[in-house]
Amino acid sequence: MCAESAQPKILIVEDKQDNIDLISYFLKPQNYELIVAMDGETAIEKVASNPPDIILLDIMLPKMSGFEVCERIKKNPETRFIPVIMITALKELKDKIHSLEVGADDFITKPFENVELLTRVKSLLRIKKYHDELERKNKELLRVDQFKDDLAHLIVHDIKNPIFIIQGNLQMMGMGLSDSATNILKKYIDRIDRSTKNLLSMVMNLIDISKIESGKMKLNKELIRVNDVIKKCVDKVRDYPENNTKKVILELSQDVPLTYIDHSVFERVMDNLITFAVSNINSEGEVNINTSFSNNVVNCEIIDDGIQIPPKYQQSVFEKYSQIEIKNEGYRLMRGLGFTFSKMAVEAHKGQLYLDNSDCTGNKFVLNIPKEKPALN
């Protein structure tokens, strides 16, 4: 890498000693570190073992032509940004064009002038220096971003424990509240319990998103009844007092077979989608949930008649970095990253989750999961 405090390293690839001596004579006064290779294969080896900051490459070489050397250097992701100046005695325009086609950054024709060689070398070394600095800063930014992600994951992971403790204590308190004098207190305990469950769900979504992105999430698949999971999620939503007058209509096909999926993950997906649909409608609104089975795929649609997410957001609504933009435009979304987790979780089951608002006034979420055979132990 070219740095201000280090001597720029120049690889001279030339098979004639007289030409090597001439080039060295021009470059040595500039305090460059000079390395020499007298054939194409040696040049490739030296570039791999001790990458230079710039290469002066003769076209006519033994074993491997300069064109081939240049092409191999430029096709290698590790060396493609090393500037290459082709040195040629060929006068044909097609040879100069070929030099550029194989990736050369510049070329000079023999015999060349001292000033011409130094000017081209200095110019490309300056560009290489800027590139190296930009690459260094990009790597530093990536390290900072990774640190932030790791720190956020650690904090989110640690939040789980106090939430579990709060839930456990709330359950203990609720067990001792049975007479009518404690009804008001019990109502507040129920509210706190619901809020902690919502908070825990958001935390688990964040943790699982991180696991899926890093490839570390393991699905504990078992044969479950999809319709039963949906009914359970709907019952939970119906228990909320604010949903008393809202309608949730189920049309669950009896043809849906036992499906091999992660029960806990799938239940959280359905919780996310059904909770959003019900919270998105007004007090007299309606949510329709239907299931079907065809072509060995379990299908589910969740349709609400609430505020429609605009078509321009139908794809980005599942992207974690789009949530703020959509919310800033005044559209209700799921708390936390529920949409993002749900899509990633369904795709981890080799399924699909998408929003299709083309034929409804509200929102229609479509979920498809292929019916897999249980893994043999």
Image (cartoon, rainbow, N blue to C red):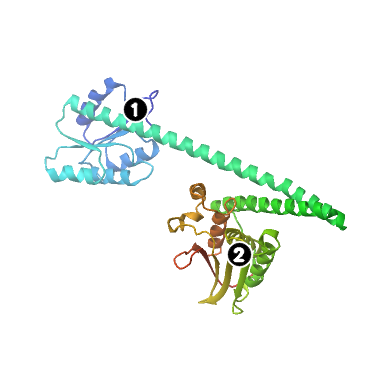
| Residue at the disc numbered 1 | 8
Find residue 308 and report its horizontal and vertical position in percent: 50, 59
Q: Are there few (<14), some (14-19), or many (20+) residues within 10 Å of tag 2?
A: few
In this rendering, is residue 357 above or below 29?
Answer: below
Q: Are the residues flagged by discs 1 and 2 in contact, CB closer than 8 Å?
A: no
5 lies above or below 371: above
Q: In this view, does 304 lie to the left or right of 55?
A: right
Q: Identify the residue at image location x=52%, y=53%.
A: 331
Residue on which the image places disc 2: 284
Disc 2 on helix, strand or loop?
loop
Q: Residue furthest left?
A: 91
- Work out whether mark 1 precedes mark 2 in sequence or the reverse, and give the earlier one: 1
- Quadrant that contains the N terminus: top left
The x and y percentages for residue 310 are 46, 57
Of discs 1 and 2, which sits in the foreground?
Answer: 2
Checking the image for residue 262, the label placed there is: none
Left or right position of 70 against 274: left
Location of residue 4 with respect to 195 vertically, above or below: above
Quadrant of the image containing the C terminus: bottom right
In the image, what residue type sits under mark 1?
Pro
